[in-house]
Image (cartoon, grey):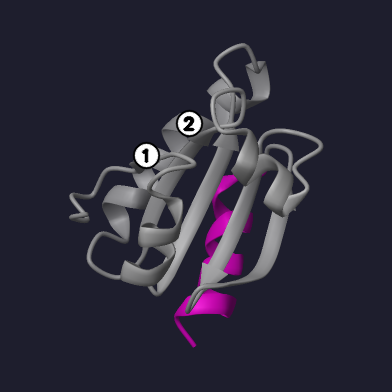
């Protein structure tokens, strides 16, 4: 998997590889019918571009990937999972402004 500055499409099949190959990984759990998920998508795309080479962003369609949803107990979307060195270290549920997400990124990955 190459970090192209765009979020990776993550699935039940390739998720574990992404965790192993990307020590700084932020996963956007979403669904196409979810209005708030659509609202946050451009922010995630922009952050993926801005942090390319440092942090990998991925997107998981929760409707198509129930194993990931179950593993992380996703009850509401959008949910951002902050994974560092293969371990979930934080999560954010709901839409948040870019600045709030960036503050969390700086605290977790860039200290």
Residue at image location 18% in from the left, 50% down from the top: 4
Query: What is the quadrant of residue 42 in the picture?
Result: top left
Residue at 36 percent of width and 60 percent of height = 17
Describe residue 111's horizontal placement relative to residue 57 as left or right: right
Magenta stretch, main secondary structure, is helix
Q: Which mark is residue 85?
A: none
- Relative to the observer, which residue lies in front, 38 or 33? 33
Where does the N terminus fall, quadrant-wise?
Answer: bottom left
In front: 58, or 52?
Answer: 58
Residue extending furthest top?
33
Lateral position of residue 70 relative to residue 102, left or right: right
Where on the picture, by quarter, is residue 88? bottom right
Q: Nearer the viewer, residue 9 or 110?
A: 9
Label 1 neighbourhood size at 10 Å, few (<14), some (14-19), many (20+)?
some
Q: Name the spot of residue 16 as percent of width and height, x first.
A: 44, 59
Residue shown at the point (59%, 30%) measured from the top left: 30
Asked whether, in this view, residue 110 is left or right of residue 55, the answer is right
Residue 45's mark? Answer: 1
Give the number of marks: 2
Disc 1 is placed on an element classified as: helix
Q: For mark 2, what is the residue? A: 41
Asked if the residue under mark 2 is in contact with the one under mark 1, i.e. CB atoms within 8 Å, the reply is yes
The residue depicted at 37 percent of the width and 59 percent of the height is 18
Q: Compared with residue 108, is residue 36 higher up or lower down, i.e. above or below? A: above
Residue 98 in picture, x, y percent from top left: 54, 48
Picture quadrant of residue 7 = top left
Cα separation between marks 1 and 2:
6 Å
In the drawing, does residue 65 fall left or right of residue 23?
right
- The stretch in magenta equals 96-111
Residue lying at the far right in this picture: please name it: 75
Say if the magenta span includes residue 102. Answer: yes
């Amino acid at each position: 998997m190459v970090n192209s500055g765009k979020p990776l499409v993550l699935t039940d099949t390739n998720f574990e590889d992404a965790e192993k190959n990307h020590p700084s990984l932020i996963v956007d759990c979403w669904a196409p019918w979810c209005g708030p998920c659509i609202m946050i998508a451009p922010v995630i795309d922009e952050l993926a571009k801005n942090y390319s080479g440092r942090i990998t962003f991925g997107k998981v369609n929760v409707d198509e990937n129930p194993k990931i949803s179950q593993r992380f107990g996703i009850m509401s979307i959008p949910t951002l999972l902050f994974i560092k060195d293969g371990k979930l270290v934080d999560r954010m549920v709901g839409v948040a402004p870019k600045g709030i997400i960036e503050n969390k990124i700086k605290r977790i990955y860039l200290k």
